[in-house]
Amino acid sequence: MQYPSRVKIVDVAPRDGLQNEKQPVPAEVKIELVHRLQDAGLKEIEVTSFVSPKWVPQMADAAQVMVGIERRPGVRYSVLTPNMKGFEAALASRPHEIVVFGAASEAFSRRNINCSIAESIERFAPVVSAAREHGIHVRGAISVAVGCPYEGEVSPANVELVARLMKDIGVQRVGVADTIGVGTPLKVQRALEAALKHYDLDDVSGHFHDTYGQALGNTLAALQMGVWQYDTSCAGLGGCPYAKGATGNVATEDVVYMLHGMGIATGIDLDQLVDAGRYISDYLRRPPNSRAATAILNKRQG
């Protein structure tokens, strides 16, 4: 089987990982986390989200965080911009990439942003257009691409629809996201195949949550298709708001450990990555939610 020889990882811990944390995390801690991630060799970091502080208070310091980062050559910093107001606010902070998102489930779209899938994509059209005019890359996330908390199983046809609509408005790369972590390998492959009907292999990424312990298996299934870009979260940060007590994003440490064990290059130093995860976990006063990090930290104490 021909696996990719190299994988690109986008660490989403500073944004997706921290946004649901109840306790406020100060801007300087978020900035330090970004610095530690880039010290570990991460070349793609999803830093923050330019959203209304009323809805996501944890991201109220988005501009402060972006200004405070010591930027490294060769590192790309992305931000989530759900609307034109968010994009205009983000513009001053010079992101390399913006992220927009559309659900593959009508029920999820209506419950979360109060409009249909088609309407949500229409809202993003001016954001995508403005970003590209400014030379900013645009990534789209297809959320609940495998299962939805309201509809149950999501059809690959829905994923294909969202991918096509995103392609039509100029989104350059799409991430197929198992937002609630219910996916299993064959279902994930079908969702990725649906996106690949409209995007090249180099423009599709995987974003898997580990709610049911399937994220590494799903990553392996995507690797078998040649998918070489993934969103992961240092220390497994990020809860799943639709599944009580469930874990969220797959831990970057676990994915990197697996990839390195398969001889797949990432450019990431696993020991420094574990240190970054321990730093933010210590601040949050809980152990890292990563099996690899736990094993490595225990071994160090041994």
Image (cartoon, rainbow, N blue to C red):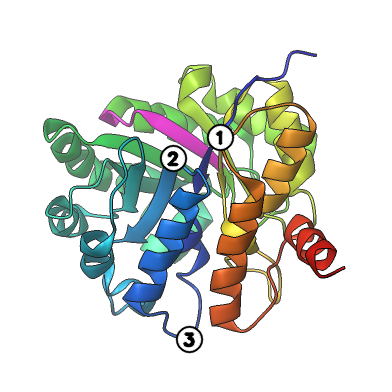
Residue 149 visible in the picture: no
Location of residue 47 with respect to 164 vertically, above or below: below
Q: Label 3 crowding class (10 Å Cα cut-off): few <14, some 14-19, many 20+?
A: few
Q: Residue at x 44, y 40 (%)?
A: 43
At label 1, the amino acid type is Gly
- Position in image of residue 186 (x %, y %): 78, 32
- Which stretch appears magenta? 169-176
Instruction: Name which residue type carries label 3.
Output: Gln
Q: Which residue is mark 1?
A: 267
Q: Who comes first in sequence, dot 3 or dot 1?
A: 3
Q: In the rendered view, would you say 56 is above or below 226?
A: below
Dot placed on the residue nearer the N-terminal end, 3 or 2: 3
- From the viewer's side, name the closer residue of 165 and 16: 16
One can see residue 259 in this view: yes
- Percent position of residue 79, x then y: 32, 52
Left or right: 22, with 256 as reference point: left
**Mark 3 vs mark 1, CA separation in Å:** 32 Å
Q: Nearer the viewer, mark 3 or mark 2?
A: 2
Q: Residue at x 28, y 75 (%)?
A: 60
Near-viewer residue (249 or 242): 249
The quadrant the C terminus occupies is: bottom right
Give the farthest residue toward the right. Answer: 302
Could you say which quadrant of the image residue 113 lies in? bottom left
Name the disc covering residue 23, or none.
Answer: 3
- Element carrying mark 1: loop
Classed neighbour count for the residue bearing mark 2: other residues with Cα under 10 Å, few (<14), some (14–19), many (≥20): many
Question: Going 19% across and 52% down the picture, which residue do you hit?
Answer: 87
Can you say whether 206 is above or below 202 in the image? Answer: below
SS class, disc 3: loop
What residue did someone put label 2 on? Answer: 43
Q: Which residue is pictured at 48% across the width and 69% down the height?
A: 18
